[in-house]
Image (tube, grey):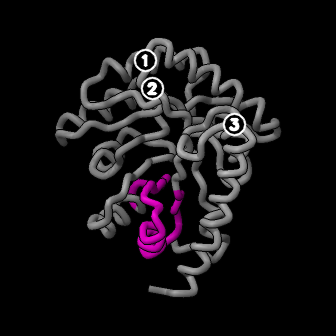
Amino acid sequence: MDIARKNQIAAGLAEVEKRIAEACRAAGRPREEVTLIAVTKTYPAEDVRILAGLGVTEVGENRDQEAADKAHACADLPLTWHFVGQLQTNKVRSVVGYADLVHSVDRSRLVAAIGREAVRAEREIGCLVQVALDDDPGRGGARPADVLGLADEIAATEGVRLGGLMAVAPLGEEPGKAFARLRDLALAVQAGHPGATIISAGMSGDLAEAVAHGATHVRVGTALLGRRKPFVR
């Protein structure tokens, strides 16, 4: 193990934990309500091992090939894998093989595909409805008006379970305002599906605003792993 890299990641983790704890205090929430997902895209499996040794076992990836390779390389570790990127239906079979929670479910066809492959693999996959908080189609997400219907579809589909909602803060808008809209939608979904308690929101730059507006999961990469030259396959 690279001791210098371990120390670098440990320092990043300490700073991120401090930021989350401060955000929870400011919001009057217990620290235990917020789960840290380490987004390890472009970084090697060795970094995942270092994180696991430091107690971080929730790992996020956004590209299937890279994620599948890392999940295989780290199969001996007690990790929960989160798929956080946009997902094409032709990648669903692979993703279902390792992911525990898919954050980017934004259309009916994807719900059906995940459910079908999960049943085939004899697994149950958690799904979050990704909400589009802006009008940029390149970033993915269901329109707010379609979220409740999509949540109902997930809840009714064999092989998947409705976990809650996910969103990325829009560019050029105050994150807190966007996350407030996400929280309102999450409460509307929970009215019909009380178990759908996850709100996945907030990244390195806006995690405090996300926690202030009810985020249960924050997805942090850069602040945790730094901007060193990334590993790319």
The residue that label 2 is drawn on is 196
Give the structural element (helix, strand or loop) at label 1. loop
Which quarter of the rendered picture does the N terminus lie within?
A: bottom left
Left or right, 182 with respect to 151, comes to: right
Task: Give the magenta range.
Answer: 38-65
Within 10 angstroms of label 2, few (less than 14), some, or many (20 or more) residues?
A: many
Foreground residue among 194 and 219: 194
Distance (Cα) linking label 3 and label 2: 22 Å
- The image shows residue 14 at horizontal and vertical percentages of 63, 66
Camera-side mark, 3 or 1 = 3
Occupied quadrant, residue 55: bottom left
Type of the residue with mark 3: Gly
Question: Marks 1 and 2, Cα distance to the nearest angstrom?
Answer: 6 Å
Q: Nearer the viewer, residue 43 or 177?
A: 177
Q: Nearer the viewer, residue 68 or 54?
A: 54
Return the residue at label 3.
Answer: 28
Residue 71 position (above or below residue 92): below
The reply to whether discs 1 and 2 touch (Cβ–Cβ < 8 Å) is yes
From this view, report whether residue 22 is shown above or below residue 144.
below
Sequence-first disc among 3 and 1: 3
Asked whether the viewer can see residue 39, the reply is yes
According to the picture, the residue beneath numbered tag 1 turns out to be 193
